[in-house]
Structures are given as C-alpha cells and as structure tokens.
Amino acid sequence: MEEDLGTPSGQSQPSTSGGTGSGTTPQSQSGPPASSALLQLSKRRRGLGVVTPNACTECRKKRAKCDGQKPCGRCKSQKDVECVYEIPVRQSKEHLRNEIENLRLRQRSSDQVFAALIRPQLWEEVLARLRGGQTVESISEWLTSLPPSGPTASSAYAHTGPSLGTGGGAGGGHDISSMQPFGDASGAPIPPITLTVGARGGSLQMPGLSNEMGGAPASPWHFSPQSQGGSTRSGSHPDLMNWATDAGPPQTRVGSWAESMQTDHLPDGIQRFRGLEQVLSPPNAPEMKPPPGSWTSITNDVNLVQHLLALYFCWEYPTFASLSKEHFLHDFQDGRHRYCSPILVNALLALGCRFSTQPMTRANPNDPYSSGDHFFKESQRLFNEEMDHHSLTTIQALGIMSIREASCGRDSESWYYAGQSIRLALEMGLHRIHDDDDEDELAVQSATFWGAFALDHAWSLATGSLPQCSSFPHLPPKPAIIGDIEASLWVPYTDDGEDRTTTFGVDLQGLPTNISEGAPLQRSCEQPSNVRSVYKCFCELSELVHQSLYVLHSPGRPLTARDLLNIYTQYLNWYDRIPEVLRLGHNFTPAVLFAHMYYHFAILLLFRPLIKLRIIGSKVSPRDVCSQAADAIQGLLTSYSQLYTLKRTPSFVPYFVLTSAIMHLAIGATGIGDEDAETSEEKMKKAAKIDPRVTDALNQGIADLTEMAPCHHFAEQALNILRFLAKKWNIEVNVDGDKMPPEDPDNLVRPYTSSLNFFAPNVRESDFMCGFGPSTESVDTLQTPSTKKSAETAENPLFWPFPMQGRPMLPTGKELEDAGFAKL
C-alpha cells in the first residue's frame, strides 16, 4: 500500500470526522483558545521532528517524505540506492532576513572601524589591533565601549588656520560687522607644526598647542586600510608608517610612463600601463578592457589614448567636468556612441597632454607649446563638420575644449567655448527634468548641465561679467552621491615616475607638507576620492558665485554694502557646512584642494574692486579680506606643490595664483594710484615701505607661476602681467628676464585684434579710440597729464587691474556713502 503523501513516513492519517488522531488528547475547557489548538494540531499533523526541508534526490523522485538522515531511512532500507542531498537553491524568507541582518551588523562594524581610522586619537590603536589579527567585530565592540571623545586635532586645525575662512562661525544671529573671516588679523607669525614620521608612528609637535589639546600627539593624516581590488601590491598597507625602511623599489598602485615601459602582457597581446585599472575602471566592472576600436584618427596607440585619459581623470576631474566618468568609460570601452564620441575623446586627449612632458604628446615633438595641438585640431574639425551641435557629447566636448584653451592662455577662445557649451545646454533643456528619460540619461544630463554651468560662472567671475543664466535660474538636481563611486580610491597617476618625500610636516590647515626628500610619496596619497561629494559642493559653490555676480554687476541695482555683506555671510556659512570628508586634514586630493582654492578665489574677486574703500559701520575690511584670501590661496598651493608638484595642477590654478599675486603686489604698493614717483629717492623710500611678508608672498607667487609655466602656458603670461604691474607701481620683483623679448616687452600685455584678451593690463587710448571725428588735441592741451590723471583717479573709487574686464555697478559721489561705502 502506497504511503499517504500528506503525512510523514511512519505515521497514520488522523480521523477526518472531527476526532483526534492517534496520540492526541481531547481539548479541555481550560485549554488554549481554538486558534491555538488548531495551530498545535497543524504542527502535530506535519510532524516537524521528522520532516526535513531538504529531501534527498531519491525521496524527491518518489515524492516521499525524507527524514534528513545521511543516508535517510528509505534509502537505507533499499539496496543499490545512493542517498544524495543537493544544495538547496531556494532559501526561506526568514533565513534571508537573518542573513541580511547579519550583513548589516558587519557593515556597521566595518564602518565604525573605518571611521575610527581617521580620528587622530584612535587610528594608531585601531591599526595595531588590525595588525594583531583581531576581528573587525571585536574592534567595533571595543570602540563602542569607549567614552565619547572631545574635538579632534584636525578640527582644531580647521578653525585655527589663517586661510580657512570660516569666520569663527558665521551662523545666524552673528553680527557681520564683528566677523573675523580669515583667522588671526594681527598678522603675527604662526609657529610651525612638525610631524615626524618613523617606524612607530607620527608625533605632532606644535609650540604652545599640545597642552591646550590635552597633550596627546595626533595626526590629521587619513590612512585608509582597505585595498581596492586589482592592487599591484600584496596586502593592504604593510607597515604604513615605516616608509624609510622599505627595501627595494616600492610596489605602489601608481602608474607612470617610465614604469609602463615594462608593460603587463595580457592574454590577447594588448599591453597596458600599470595603474590604469585603478583610474579607468568603471565601478562594478570586472576588469579594464581596451576599447574595441580607435576613437581618434590621430593615433593608433591604444596605450597612449588610455594613458592620456588617465592623466585627465586623475588631475583635472571632476571640477568643471561636464561628463559622467562612469557612463563615459562604459561606452568608451564598449564602443557605444551614446555617452562617448570622437569629438569628446579628442578633446579629453588634448587636455590630458597638458599633464605630460613626453614628446609623443606634442604635435611637434620639439615644441612644448604644441602639446595636444593635434588632438585639439581634430576636435575643432569634428565640431565644424557637425550640422547640429545639440548633443550631450558635443556640449561636454566644448567644456573640455574651453578648459584646455584656458590652460594655453587663450582666454578669448576658452570663454567662447564655455559660452557655447552652456547655451547649447539651455537650448536642449538639460536644466529641466523629463520623466520619460531613464536613470542613466538623467544622470548624464545633470552632470552635463552642471559642468557647463560651473565653467560659465568661473569665466564670468574672472572677467567681471554676468553669466548666461538669468538672475533666478531653474536648476536641475545635482548628480547623486553613490557609495561605490564615493569610496573608490584616488591614486596619483603620473607621467614621469618621480618618487619624492619621506618626512612630512603638517600645516595649520591639517595638510601634510614635505620636509625632506627620500621615500615614495605615492603611498601616502592613496585616499578615498569622495568624487561625488566634491562635485556636489562645487556645484553649490557655483550657485553662490551666481548670486555674487548679480550682486556686483546688475545695472538695475547698484552694489550696496548690505548686499555685499549678505553674500559674504552666505559664503562663510557654505564653507562651515561642507561635509567632514572634504575638510582639510581629512581629504587632500587635487580636486578637494582645488575646490578650497576656488572658494578663496571667489571671495577675493568679490572684494578686490573695493580695496580702496571701507564699509561704513562694519569691521570687515575689503583689503584685509582680500589679503587673507590671497594668503589662503598661496598656502593651499604650497601644500599642493609639496604633495604633487605644480607640474600637475588643474588648468585654472594659474588664474588663482595670478589673482593672489596681484593682490600681494597691490598691497605692497602703498598708496595705490600714486604710481609715478618723481625722484629715485622717493622710489627708494616707497620700496622700503613694503612689508617683508608681502615681498616673500610675491616672490613665492612668481616661483609658483614659473614652475607651472611648462604645463600651463597661461602661467608664462601671468609672469609678464606681474612684471608690467610691478614696473607701473614701482615695485622691484624678480621675474625671469629670459622669457621677455628684448624689444618692448610691454607689448606682450596689450590687447590685440585676434583676441578679446581679457587679462590685458596695458591698455592705451590708441587701443580703443578710432581716428574719425574732430581732433581732441585742443582739449587735451588744456589739461596736463598729471591733472587729467588725478581727475580720473578721483572719479574712480574702484581697483581694477584689467581695463578690458567689467567693473561692479557702484554709485559715485554722495550716493556712494548712501550705499554704505567710504573712501579710505
């Protein structure tokens, strides 16, 4: 007789007439409720003690109950039958819930340990426990048992540095007139901080500060113990602090042109440079693969194309980026033209060439000025052949072309391409959300618009003009912050294979500074990229720049002190709210340092026209704010130089340095407007008045521009501008004269007809006056040059070194005082 399929093997079927089956007891009146009794009856019918959730193969075939033994009872009673259990594919929901909860607990423990690694008081102990073999869970339990700690050293640096601009708090309710926007206004020298790096960790030394902070030495360095897949180095970070004792060449992730001569051979015979997989691998991609075909007609060298792209994504991306790296790389490697195109690839290669010194990256191998010209001309050719420019990749390419031309010092061309990019973005409606677009399309549209928006506002800020968007623009959501992209490591990918630094100091911004030469720098620079957070904060900063431009340059509403202080307060509040991971001392990628420099650059240009004025009833001095912002830019650049050198800086950095150096030059020229000293004795007296600190800052700015000149040719133009202004204001500066032609070097900084040449300080009447109409000689003879100059100076309360640029809309005469300003 065949067994009943509804009961376990070996049990009888209970009666269906309402009675209980064998082994059951009648329900008493004092027993459980009916529902509970039915539940117990159901459990007895199922025979939970006998049934197994995973039956053997033979019982499954016979559709019989299996007792779960190995071998089970049925198979044991039969001859020549093998009892086999298959791994279950399906799992119960309860099992999956438990597994998910366990994973969440492990993730929380890991997050807690990683967070402790950036805390100065804890990272050494946590690292020691990890090296000792303790589990992440046990370290997490130990961290949970600790009492709450006080403020970290890095947070102290963030509020004591002379160049952070937090204003000592700019929240609501503070009197703007009493704000100290940039650290100590006394100008007293700041004692240096030194971090001595050795095999047993770092020790922080700062005179007068250790006792105030509890006496415990701390390091603001962010050491990340996790290692991304595909590392060329075994282990996570073996003996992180013992850099000086490493034997042999360091095995780092850093890809360089010199190392790439020993290339890795792949199974298909393709060669690739070491380090490319860290820079050019999209998230969740199993491995980097070469593109199926060439995206450019200039070269067939796939390695060169990938190398130049990696240089761009390492040193320029994501600030002002109008493309989504992840979508671009997926289509680049798969050969799709949705988010990748030849015009975009050629533009990126042209910009990537700015970070290379190799002859093969030049149109003329013997001419460094031709770096990337062949790729750029190909982009221009493709752009001119297009019948319709309304595509995402064309808008992105125009933004990249603009950045490249800015690096070359062709400001008119760069301004044109940036303008075309934002205009096309607005015409395509990229600032509007379309519900019918998929998630990828919306993400790329958002990145494209915000990149064009930020670039347009950077040029409007630098040239003193209104942006292409209206006063209250309709803006799309910013690109989302995605965890995998945010946590991806930034690694320095270089072109020359230089290894530098072993001992570091720490400046007041919490940044490492180079003290001596020796072991490889690159290990210390590996860090989470936080690339989406950087991009989001940069977009927010561009929105503030948008507001400040309309405050300064709206013809219908002249500038007032109230409006100026209001937008200044918004800048301070924005800086105070930036995420902790982007604060100095936590993250020091090139993009983060660039964003901080751009913030100070925006504040400097907000107040620069007003340095000959004071704000009535306020302690905020435009000249002091500009001086402190200029110092902040130079301090950040010094840290950047000591970390990465100035041969690999984003393309707009020379513009920041020029603006900072001009401010130092203007402050050094005591009595602006009295540029012409009549005698050599007066010139010597005037030179003696210059503060030595200003002289040092000016010399440092000149040295920085000189170092950047081979990479960014605008830096060479900036040196000519500084030389001209110093001569005009009778200030001695040491600018390399070899870059100046012997014939009339002042002509180098004059306007010329083939360009708008915004940064032209040497503008004469003949540059903009035509020869038509009645002669003005009879009028000019009535005024001596000195009288005419004094009249012009009296009517112009603004400081503006470049006459070709716009000026703020500021009232004059009695209305100037009504607006809240007075002359110094």
Image (cartoon, rainbow, N blue to C red):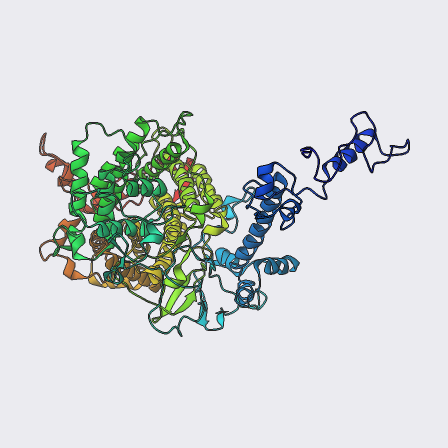
Does residue 690 show up? no
In screen coordinates, is 42 left or right of 793? right
Q: Looking at the image, can residue 143 be seen?
A: yes
- When asked about the image quadrant of residue 188, the answer is bottom left
Q: Residue furthest right?
A: 29
x and y percent of residue 52 in the render?
A: 65, 43
Q: Nearer the viewer, residue 152 or 824?
A: 152
Count of marks overlaid on the render: 0
Closest to the observer, 141 or 52: 52
Q: Is residue 293 left or right of residue 201?
A: left
Picture layout, residue 264 above or below residue 580: below
Where, by quadrant of the figure, is residue 96 drawn?
A: top right
Horizontal and vertical percent position of residue 672: 30, 51
Is 657 above or below relative to 197? above
Q: Where residue 323 appears, x then y in whole percent?
A: 33, 40
**Residue in the image at 35% along x and 32% along y:** 554
Check the image and report above or below for 592 versus 207: above
* Residue drawn at point x = 41 percent, y = 54 percent: 229
Quarter of the figure with the N terminus? top right
Quick one: 537 or 783, which is closer to the camera?
A: 537
Q: Position of residue 89 (x, y in %)?
A: 54, 42
> Quick check: 547 left or right of 649?
right
